[in-house]
Amino acid sequence: MADGIHQAIETVFRIERARLIGGLARLVRDVDLAEELAQDALVAALAEWPRTGVPTKPGAWLMETARRRAIDGFRRQRMRARKHAEIALAQDEADDGADALEAALDDDLGDELLGLIFAACHPVLPPQARSALTLRLVGGLTTGEIARAFLSPEATIAQRIVRAKRTLRSTGLAFEVPRGAERQPRLASVLEVIYLIFNEGYVATSGEDLIRPALAAEAQRLGRILAGLMPEEPEVFGLLALMELQASRFAARTGPDGALVPITDQNRARWDWLLIRRGLAALARAEALGGADRPYALQAALAACHARARTAEETDWPRIAALYDRLCAVAPSPVIELNRAVAYSMAFGPETGLALLDAIERADALRDYAPLPAARGDFLFRAGRWAEARHEFQTAASLSRNARERDFLLRRAAACGG
């Protein structure tokens, strides 16, 4: 019984963690302190809730507990008069309007979370630090997971996060959603962060599970909020379209045993056609706003090619290859070049794909990147070069940090024969 309650508490905390930190950071203007206070609230819940039960509004309970801890801590430590006055004022206002506080914490718009993202994406931070910090605070990812998302050493990511927190603390900025002209310059990094969060949910970089749907769903929710805030911004709709279309395949991406199912083998009857309709509508909106050749809209157009094909054989691979040509022109990167090679191999044959891989295989960003040998293995397999394909699949499996992906690659190696 106690184990069940503890598990329920931990689940609630995982759900509420990011919004809790966002609300606390807005209050204390210190990310490290906000994280400590959130953890204190979890400890209090583990002590209290087994006796009293999970509250009706657990998020509000956690926030109230953490906020009172903050006030007590500031009083004990005799913090600077300004901060003490701010916290005391917040306490007085909250005591006068507890119902309003609870309503805000249960608000689906997630102002605390968006405020946390925009603060973490403030121009005072280097671009890479913005993404790493927000993935840590909002996505709850470990530094190792973030490092793999960025294809960077873990120590580098850890240093970025520490320095970013220190910088935000020294600036004393407000953890709020920016308004007016201040919002636009920070939008690109916010979109990047949301996309990276979604990708971690779409293909988990480590662990036993291939996908983390809750993380992807959080990114989709944030994308929908941004679309409501910025109805004339094409790339917001481009990113939203991309996430909705990709998420539509979640139910078909894994088999009953959790194993990976490639898109060419998926049961398309299991795709979520409501999400596909939403994604296509968001893509149409992005294109109508003049964003057809922007990076997220182009990636959404790629996903739309798969969504519109009722069978794998109907997939328009030449169009996908052409879209990758346009994407490489506006957002060149080794990973996009790798995906372009995959598209060309499907459209024009495996030897064409192999030639494109030869041109990019030495890129630093692709060193120890499992999808590179996995792609080469697939091309070699389809070219009938099975011994070479087996070696590539085995290499990819050795590089993968995800158990399900590794099992899939080893099965492909075994399919190549002895």
Image (tube, rainbow, N blue to C red):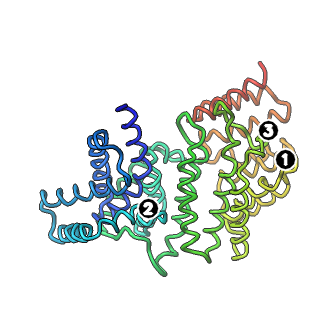
> In 3D space, how far apart are the residues under numbered discs 3 and 2 (Cα atoms)?
43 Å
Which residue in the protein does label 3 denote? 379
Mark 3 or mark 2, whichever is nearer to me: 2
Residues packed near mark 3 inside 10 Å, few (<14), some (14 to 19) or many (20 plus): many
Question: Looking at the rendered structure, which numbered label has been put on residue 311?
Answer: 1
Question: Looking at the rendered structure, which numbered label has been put on residue 347?
Answer: none
Give the residue type that dot 3 points to. Answer: Phe
Q: Left or right: 355 with respect to 229?
A: right
Quadrant of image for the N terminus: top left
Give the residue type that dot 2 points to. Answer: Leu
Quadrant of image for the C terminus: top right
Which residue in the protein does label 2 denote? 113
Residues packed near mark 2 inside 10 Å, few (<14), some (14 to 19) or many (20 plus): many
Q: Please name the residue shown 33% across and 66% down the image.
A: 99
Compared to 407, does 339 lie above or below? below
> In 3D space, how far apart are the residues under numbered discs 1 and 3 (Cα atoms)?
21 Å
Question: Of marks 1 and 3, which one's residue comes earlier in the chain?
Answer: 1
Q: Residue 329: horizontal and vertical position, in percent?
A: 72, 64
Instruction: State if disc 1 and disc 2 touch (CB < 8 Å).
Output: no
